[in-house]
Amino acid sequence: MPELPEVETMCRGIRSIVGRKIVSVAKPRCRYRPIHIHPSLPTIRKRLANQRVTQISRLGKRVLIHAGSQALILQPKMTGMVTLGQAPDPDHIRLRVDLAGSSSQQVLFWDRRGLGTVELLRESEIHERIVAGRLGPDALSISYADFAARLSATKRAIKVALLDQKLVAGIGNLYASEMLHVARIHPATVAAKISAPKKRRLFECMQDILLTAIEYEGSTLADGTYRNALNDPGSYQNQHLVYDRAKLDCPSCAQGKIVRIVQAQRSTFYCPRCQLSR
DNA sequence: CATATGTCCTGAGAGC
DNA sequence: TGCTCTCAGGACATAT
């Protein structure tokens, strides 16, 4: 499940296309239900043809390919990934961006489950259509004061709050469990009731874990879905302390067993011994 | 307004 | 072995 570290890795992996000219955009025919693409592919093709890629950026868990005062916005959601011509299989390639040049290259949007989306927006539309009312500050650039204030303003369980992209953008189910474990906060703690020192600890763990996960090029889970731009797996999964480790010994205290609970229909993993209820 | 729930999708793995 | 069923969860639409 691509979260901030995985999406950041995708961005870094395709950043070498900056300066290249887009020749065409195509949707390979496949037997699966088409993913959501807006506007229509012919329109996207028309608007991007012969435009030069000026920048690659990340907005929360989206990859943005900027070209000609527009951005092609790829949202991987559950099983999507953005690569340089590589894919686990040819069957789930949902979009192909062909680039000009001596070493012609392609950016592929591969998505097994097809929950991902593709959108082409003018730069002036991005804020209104993507950010406003939906995306909070990025988890890697939010200030501690803002982070603390936002946690204080919600009565939800901290684990559920961390998944809310308008509270802070970029955290998903996996890293939420990991950062709460390292910060030694019980996932069911009401966000507003977390003490200031613990909030500070969580803030630091959030940055630390996300940055470290980026260094490891993200987490590739058992289904092997997420890969970097060259189709190689990440390696942060080897650093997971609690995620998907139910019933195993806690690596932090070596005494408790990791427990799986469900919060807001999502799995949460934690160590009851390390992460005491308040 | 804040928060909760249903929905989309495919394939891995469980269970029989 | 082969079938059916459940589950995984990001983010939006809709409901409370």
Image (cartoon, coloured by chain):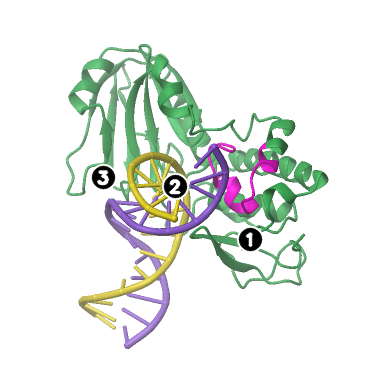
Chain colours: A green, B purple, C yellow
Give the label on residue A51, or none. Answer: none
Earlier sequence position, callout 1 versus callout 2: 2
The answer to whether any part of residue A59 appears in the image is yes
Mark closer to the observer (1, 2): 1
Q: Is residue A1 visible?
A: no
Q: Chain of mark 1?
A: A
Q: Is residue A161 left or right of residue C13?
A: right
Chain of the residue displaying label 3: A
Kindly identify which residue carries mark 2. Answer: A226
Disc 2 marks which amino acid? Tyr
- Find the distance from the CA under tag 1 to the CA under tag 2: 19 Å
Residue positioned 77% across, 45% down in the render: A201
Q: Is residue A1 above or below residue A99?
A: below
Circle 2 crowding by C-alpha within 10 Å: few under 14, some 14–19, many from 20? many
Q: Quadrant of the C terminus of chain A?
A: bottom right
Along the horizontal axis of the image, is A101 left or right of A140? left
| Left or right: residue A218 compared with residue A48 | right
Q: Secondary structure under badge 3?
A: loop
Span highlighted in magenta in the image? A150-171
What label does residue A242 carry, if any? 1
Q: Position of residue A225 (x, y in %)?
A: 41, 51
Determine the image quadrant of residue A90: top left
Question: Can you identify the residue that label 3 sits on?
Answer: A90
Q: Position of residue A169 (x, y in %)?
A: 55, 36
**In the rendered structure, the residue with mark 2 lies on which chain?**
A
- Looking at the image, which residue is at 75% across and 44% down? A199
